[in-house]
Amino acid sequence: MYRKKTIAGYTLIVVGITALICSLVFVFLGYNFVLKPDIDFEEEQTLNQTEYQSDYISIPGFEAWTIDAGETWVSTNFYNPDSNNCYFVISVVLDDTGETIYESKYVKPGQRLYEVELLKALEAGTYEATLHYSTYSMTDNSPMNGADVPFSLIVQ
């Protein structure tokens, strides 16, 4: 009788250790094969600076920007492309009134603004607006050419 209890005890210990080992193997290795979603990302790319010499300024734009009514802090994705050799000051101007509702400080090449504070909250509606880019030399801070990009500002 004592021998049966000992064998049963050893069996439980072996089963427990086996279950623990299987769990650890699944957690550390199985996740990559079983639970990991099938997502394929693009590889990181680098720009060969010796091959790319641009005298042009890249100006990003968009057709519409949607923000929340009554809010001054809003989400966005204003940026200065990495390829530029100048600083940006980005302004948002309402076309009907000529009122500037946002103006950034200097934005370095490669820098992005994901949240900005408007100078005033807007009521719901669709506004025609202009994204105005003022550009400045990185060597002496002198003004360079600028650009205006029209877009629809959708306030909901």
Image: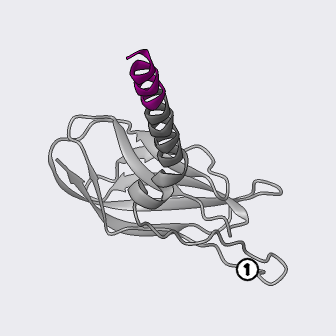
Q: How is the image coloured?
A: one colour
* Amino acid type assigned to the residue bearing label 1 in the image: Ser
Chain part drawn in magenta: 1-12
Residue 35 at x, y percent in the picture? 39, 54
Seen as rendered, the residue at the extreme bottom is: 51
Horizontal arrangement in the rendering, residue 13 relative to residue 57 (left or right)? left
The answer to which quarter of the image holds residue 68 is: top left
Residue at x 76% of width, y 81% of height: 52
Q: Is residue 88 above or below residue 84?
A: above
Does residue 89 appear to the left or right of 65 in the view shown?
right
Q: Position of residue 72 (x, y in %)?
A: 33, 34
Say above or below: 33 vs 75: below
Of residue 30 and residue 17, the one placed in the foreground of this image is 17
Dominant SS type (magenta): helix
Q: Is residue 98 above or below residue 10?
A: below
Please give the residue where the numbered disc 1 appears in the rendered image.
54
**Is 61 displayed left or right of 42 in the figure?**
left
Residue 72 in the magenta stretch? The answer is no
Please, is residue 57 above or below residue 26 in the view? Answer: below
- Considering the image in quadrants, where does the N terminus appear? top left
Q: Position of residue 100 (x, y in %)?
A: 39, 47
